[in-house]
Image: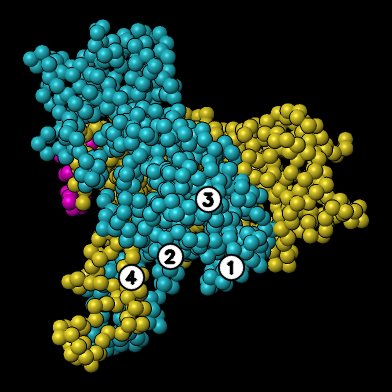
Chain colours: A cyan, B yellow
Amino acid sequence: MGDQATPPAPELAAMAINDGPCLKHPFSDRAPVRSIVCRPDGGAALAGNRVRAGGWVKTGREQGKGSFAFLEVNDGSCPANLQVIVDAGVADLSTLVQTGTCVLVEGLLKMPPEGTKQKIELRVDKVLHVGPTDPASYPIPKTKLSLEFLRDHIHLRPRTNTISAVARIRNALAFATHSFFQEHGFLYVHTPIITTSDCEGAGEMFQATTLISEAEKLDKELIMNPPPTEADIEAAKCTVGEKRWRKEPKLKPGIPKKDGKIDYGQDFFGRQAFLTVSGQLQVETYACAVSSVYTFGPTFRAEHSHTSRHLAEFWMVEPEIAFADLQDDMNCAEAYVKYMCQWLLNKCFDDMELMAKLYDKGCIDRLRMVSSTPFERITYTEAVQLLEEAVRGGKEFEKNVEWGIDLASEHERYLTEDIFKKPVIVYNYPKGIKAFYMRLNDDSKTVAAMDILVPKVGELIGGSQREERYEVIQQRIAEMGLPLEPYEWYLDLRRYGTVKHCGFGLGFERMILFATGIDNIRDVIPFPRYPGRADL
Amino acid sequence: MGDQATPPAPELAAMAINDGPCLKHPFSDRAPVRSIVCRPDGGAALAGNRVRAGGWVKTGREQGKGSFAFLEVNDGSCPANLQVIVDAGVADLSTLVQTGTCVLVEGLLKMPPEGTKQKIELRVDKVLHVGPTDPASYPIPKTKLSLEFLRDHIHLRPRTNTISAVARIRNALAFATHSFFQEHGFLYVHTPIITTSDCEGAGEMFQATTLISEAEKLDKELIMNPPPTEADIEAAKCTVGEKRWRKEPKLKPGIPKKDGKIDYGQDFFGRQAFLTVSGQLQVETYACAVSSVYTFGPTFRAEHSHTSRHLAEFWMVEPEIAFADLQDDMNCAEAYVKYMCQWLLNKCFDDMELMAKLYDKGCIDRLRMVSSTPFERITYTEAVQLLEEAVRGGKEFEKNVEWGIDLASEHERYLTEDIFKKPVIVYNYPKGIKAFYMRLNDDSKTVAAMDILVPKVGELIGGSQREERYEVIQQRIAEMGLPLEPYEWYLDLRRYGTVKHCGFGLGFERMILFATGIDNIRDVIPFPRYPGRADL
């Protein structure tokens, strides 16, 4: 007790400071559960310390004919609960034991008697707060709930074991992402969400507009202030001798039009604006100035995809490297994926154990394999040959395999899961199926593009060396039937001080699916958006 | 030479690996300039090393009657340039010396002769790449350019000293943000960009919609496939004996309406959706489950503000802490701001020196002061008294001071810049000027809100303890004339296992203005969006 020093928990030095008699969070009224229970000794060294702890009751039961209660309390700082014991004299036990009740309690940490499971417990002598729950109406009871059911309660689902573990894994992968790129000298660049450029072919876009709301506002004003009648106009003319009213109302209801088309000149930005589908083109402006950069932000697709792999709003990581070619790009992408896998093994092992138990018993081994095994690298042409061989050997695919096709998910997964049983980088794709900005190879048939395929999700990363030759890219834009004018700024990067450069994009939710083994992408983002659904 | 070890640059261990004969970037073809010149000895210890370097020429000049050229080359990894010397035999010097030319060169590092300024130079023997620039048309010549001019060339402006320094400072502050919250056990939560909730009173919102583009698509289809004529219908009737054509075309042009109003049931999400103005309400769902969380993402305002302080798209940091009250909130916010200031002093001192030289000679002292001085904390009532005293003493404000007003920027800056000369936290504001979710104090007149005011920008942070009492918040919503139904999910957080909690929001661009002393917010975000402008 007293001032004796206690060893800080791994990764939690700043939180586990012994602030007088209590272990205490620096900006909160209690010690995080993690700082008490996530210790190699199960917290034994803390026995005898006075501590304040808070969280939500996972399970509770009264014991000894109602003379005391056992509570399993979780505060989201780790998957493990803190075992809390409250005497009947201290609080109303029947409220405390309900799943979902919030408690803030204080007491002494004790090791349970020998023979029981050796995990530190909190013997409470003060109950500082109770946030009760009505068990009759609480939507998230103790019983096992399906992930699908939880999607209808996204405001309460982070209180479940699965969704809170996903939150910690997602957080870890986000910080791993920043740490990786910062350690390697990349600058984080915020590319715009609202954009007037179209990253060609990426998909349908949402419009960001004030035209409709302005029109609705005018509609309302018009009802309240109807346009003047002929009599009003005559009267106005009489009183001041100048034309104060015009026959046409100044307020025109509806979306403004010009020459039969919508007049975007009257929209907020004076032109049509969209939600970004990728920050790549914009971040290239920074790569061609400060060399190594990355984005990490939300991107959007207005596709009516009702699959377990697509969202209308999702997060992407997009690095871009100057003075670098396709090999450098693959090296960077492979190092980044390995780094994230190792990071989860180091920092989220307890959450990964939960995923292994509940969703995918191979997920930990998969992280170990990916973090330690060199990725296979094959050309697109080799990939097609391997798939054709498989077909000759009896393998059936829904989509026919031949040189020139865009590989389907079934092909990608067969390559990574069945043939190589590890991540595969496929590179040098036919130019016909890829975007104009990818660098044309010397064969004039393929471009310096690469995709990383991983078991469980298929394509995790797509990237390319960018076409840095002014004449070539100009011709490619023309070949694809795209107008040059909107790309003049992009061409300027090639016109003035051009540099070879490359980059890739990683779908952040795909990475979480890959890591956890969870099946539906709607369960790995806090607030999923898809056709017909945008809760909160 | 050969395998001799060279000391790694500070913060750049991973980049300065001696990979065979060259210092080399791990995923690129060259050593970052930073790893060569940003060393305590100015790079002297590297003399004799063979190195490959790349970047853009800042200034170049031919010397010795055109027998060699001096180039100042910058790759954005630091504000300093690498001095590069190229002999006429190696390359065409007249191209190389143009500002904006991209070069990739190889050679030996040498210290210049005694007597000149002691900074390492690269004597080039191989020019591997030249990306030329036409000086007649290059929009970013060597001459001094105004920040306003550069806003018309946002795709090239990161090649300037100021904008690249801002990019490094912005990057540093972003990583400082993640580091601070991760060190303190907070989870990073991605709140939604597209939202169907309205964080009451925050401002005008953009709509995210596919209604207009769908209507335009239908318009086009209708032109290509005009509705059937009476004759078509008769013909169809004849051929199959059943009604295959309807008189009304199935495709209806225009925005779909229902009962005279726009039918959002047909929009992508089946309801009206907006771009978020704040992630606070949504992130509270995670705070009330996993305790300590933060968001860091883009937010939007469709306000027609043409000021140097407002953007239509900007980034916000919003932490939210459970088991924490207003005091904890202030402690966290103060610690976070101090941490960022200290981080810049530690990691971006050279960029800060540039800011001090070009924009605000006091900016470094300001960072030192803020990182080391306790913030003043006064109630709103005390703040109003101080301002009233100032008025009695002869100070003139545009807006009258009296208890109950929302403090204007002039008042805020007077408090922090003139009265206290340091950051000031004003707390306990009148409930009438604050949002419904802020916790009502026992006086029933004020709420537990706080703003942090700093010299140079005024309000940097706004936060509050949230009302966690179900009955009180329900009544506050009613008092403000808001409907209850859209807030039912928010009320659930109070209905089930409620917990005291608090949080705040920091405008990320405001923090950069504060740190750098730059005047216009459009210069501290890579792709500024404001009324009439959304380039790229």
Q: How far across and how far down the image is residue A175, in percent? A: 46, 37
For mark 3, what is the residue? A426
Chain letter of mark 4 equals B
Circles 2 and 1 in contact, beta carbons < 8 Å = no
Left or right relative to A27: residue B355? right
Q: From the image, state whether disc 2 or disc 4 is nearer to you.
A: 4
Q: Is residue B200 above or below residue B293?
A: below
Q: Are discs 1 and 4 both within one chain?
A: no
For mark 1, what is the residue? A476
- Kind of residue at badge 1: Arg
For mark 4, what is the residue? B214
- Label 1 sits on a secondary structure element that is helix
Q: From the image, state whether disc 3 or disc 4 is nearer to you.
A: 3
Q: Is residue A168 above or below residue A96?
A: below
Q: From the image, state whether disc 3 or disc 2 is nearer to you.
A: 3
Left or right relative to B271: residue B365? right
Q: Which numbered disc flags the more N-terminal residue, 2 or 1?
A: 2
For mark 2, what is the residue? A273
Q: Are discs 2 and 4 both within one chain?
A: no
Q: Nearer the viewer, residue A68 or B214?
A: B214
Q: Are discs 3 and 4 both within one chain?
A: no
Magenta region: which residues?
A: B468-485
The answer to whether residue A426 shows anywhere in this view is yes
Q: Residue at x 14, y 21 (%)?
A: A61
Locate the N terminus of chain A by quadrant. top left
- Kind of residue at badge 4: Glu
Q: Report the label total.
A: 4
Q: Is residue B224 above or below residue B353?
A: below
